[in-house]
Amino acid sequence: MLVLRSRLNVTDDQREQIRGIVEAHRSEIAVAARPVVEKRRALRAVVTADAPNESDIRAAAADLSGALGDAAVLAARIRSEVFAVFTPEQQTLIQESRTERDDAVDGFLNQMAEAQ
C-alpha cells in the first residue's frame, strides 16, 4: 500500500479533500466500526474457546456478517467520494494495484491448494 501511495503522487489539495471527506463521515465510521469490532471479538471468543461449539461459531460468524455488510455499504459510499478526488491516471493506478493484490492472493491460494 505504501508503494501505491508513493506512486499516486497525491497533491496537498487532494490530501485535504480526502481528510475532509473522512472527517465528514467520522461519526458514521465510528457507528459502523464498533459493532464490527465487538462481533469480531465475540467470534474470536467462541473460536478460541476451550470447547469450541460449531453452532456457536456459525451464529457468531453470521452475526459478524451483518455488521460487516453495514460497514461495507458505508465504505463503498466513502470510497466513491474519495475516488472522485483522484485524477483519471491516479484512478487507473489504484485499479491496477487492486488487480495486482488480487492476483497475488490468488497465487498464494493456488500454491496452498497445490501443496496438499
Image (cartoon, rainbow, N blue to C red):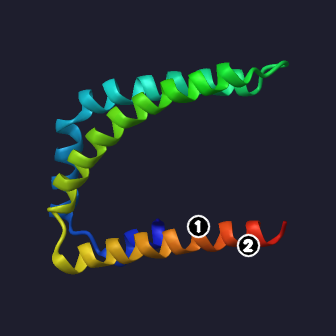
Please tell me which residue lies in front, 40 or 111. 111
Quadrant in the picture for residue 24: top left
Label 2 neighbour load within 10 Å: few <14, some 14-19, many 20+ = few
Is disc 2 placed on a helix, strand or loop? helix
Which label was assigned to residue 105? 1
Q: Earlier in the sequence, mark 2 or mark 1?
A: 1
Residue type (three-letter) at the residue carrying disc 1 = Val
Residue 50 shows up from this direction: yes
Q: Quadrant of residue 22?
A: top left
Judge left or right: residue 116 versus residue 3: right
At mark 1, the secondary structure is: helix
Can residue 41 be seen here? The reply is: no
Q: Residue furthest front?
A: 55
Quarter of image, res 43: top right
| Residue depicted at 32% across the width and 24% down the height | 31
Residue 83 position in % (x across, y down): 21, 61
Q: Is residue 72 above or below residue 31?
A: below
The answer to whether 22 appears left or right of 107 in the picture is left
Residue at the image point whose x is 39% and y is 74% from the top: 6
x, y (%) of residue 25? 21, 36
Nearer to us in this view, 8 or 45: 45
Query: Label 1: how many residues lie within 10 Å, few (<14), some (14-19) or many (20+)?
Result: few
Q: In the picture, which quadrant includes the C terminus?
A: bottom right
Which residue was labeled with disc 2? 111
What's the amino acid at mark 2?
Gln
Residue 49 at what x, y percent from top left? 78, 20
In the image, which disc is placed on residue 58?
Answer: none
Is residue 2 found left or right of 75 in the rendered image? right
Report how many numbered discs are placed on residues in the image.
2
Q: CA distance from mark 2 to mark 1?
A: 10 Å
